[in-house]
Image (tube, helix red, strand yellow):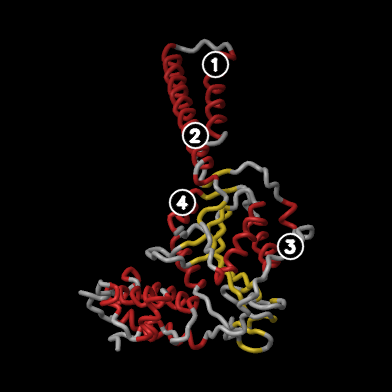
Amino acid sequence: MHEVDYYELLGVSPSASPAEIKSAYRALARAMHPDTGGTAGTFRLLQEAYETLGDPLRRARYDRGDDLDALEGEPAGAGVTVTWNRASRTAFRSYQRERRRWRRFGEDPDFLPALPAIDTEHIPWWHSVDPHDRVQCLPRACLGHAPALAVTGSFLLLLTPVLLGADPSPAVLALWLLMLAAAVFAAVHLLRSHLADARNDRAFLTGPGGRAISGSTSTEQEDWGERLTAELLSRYLTRLPGARIFHGLSLPGSVFVDVHHAVLCGRRLVLVESKMWLPGHYSTDEYGDLWRDDHVFRGGGSSLAECVDAYQDLLPDVEVRGVLIVYPSRAGAITTGDVSAAEVPPMIPEDFVHDIGQWLSPQPTTVDRNAFNTLLEQVI
């Protein structure tokens, strides 16, 4: 008999599928990682449980009650002292409650939804932007035309006595020459700064800032929805020249993928999570609770609202919102009603392209370099 029940630790049954074990490990690892309040010993034990149950051979040996340490020739938990602090225990109990509440049911393991073809003919923002427009950076490093106009105006003002043929006194002439030298110095300084800033802008846009897509998506079949969303973003939102798409982002201080996708355009950011739920009609009540076909929906949950808050704190100058893109988990259609009361509303792909594209379109050619660099650092 093993000292620790790995199934109980992960919160799964002995008959759990590899996908269920992986999902349980991901959820608990986020909460029990030492960087998020857990302890090193508990996190190490969690990793051992996943490595054992995630490997078919080791899992079979574990189920038979074999001594894994002897079989592997290496003690799995040697020298590890497991301490459940308050944060780890609270996170584990919370996960267990939510797992019982948010049961996954009704999925068809042999069904894979397809990305719908979206008719863009009646999408207003689609025709208001030109995908070939030149991209610009914010905050602007280049000084623009104002300094050049100011210097030109100063020269004309200083040359006025000459143009009018006036005969200034030596003192006035000396002052005028001094002002002319100062204007020339300022013009040269502004010109050099302008050229340097222009080179920085070009370097940013020809480097990482010029990439429309950063990061990658999971190739696991259970993450099929993420791959569909990645294709959706690439196919439609890249029409906005300034849109920058990120796949697989972590929360600040985390080492795990906490946000499936993000799209930055100008100073607006949308965080996206992909869901595969039962076909039906989804709506929200006055309290923001999600309903499916006139019943409170218990088939799935999301932590995207907390991610939106975290990224809003990380990027205070950027407007952040979150969206769940929902695909059917079996044959059938998904529709949504009024979800305006939802903090993170579910949307079908067509509504996402229509509504979120419109929300991102006010600054279609602008890339916020500071926000872009911050998001790039969060890509796993």
Q: Which residue is mark 2?
A: 199
Mark 4: few/some/many CA within 10 Å (<14, 14-19, 20+): few
Q: Which residue is mark 1?
A: 161
Left or right, residue 225 beside residue 51: right
- Disc with the residue nearer the chain's start (1 vs 2): 1
Mark 1: few/some/many CA within 10 Å (<14, 14-19, 20+): some
- Disc with the residue nearer the chain's start (3 vs 4): 3
- Disc with the residue nearer the chain's start (2 vs 4): 2
- Disc with the residue nearer the chain's start (1 vs 3): 3
Q: Nearer the viewer, mark 1 or mark 4?
A: 4
Q: Which mark is residue 51?
A: none
What distance separates the C-alpha of mark 2 from that of mark 4? 18 Å
On the image, the x and y values in percent for residue 139 come to 51, 46
Q: Which residue is mark 3?
A: 117
Q: Which residue: 50% across, 66% down?
A: 259
- SS type, badge 4: helix
On the image, the x and y values in percent for residue 7 come to 39, 84
Left or right, residue 224 beside residue 252: right
Q: Nearer the viewer, residue 210 or 194?
A: 210
Q: Which residue: 55% across, 47% down?
A: 211
Pointers 1 and 4 in contact (CB under 8 A)? no
Q: Amino acid at mark 4?
A: Asn
Q: Which residue is mark 4?
A: 373
What distance separates the C-alpha of mark 1 from that of mark 2? 38 Å
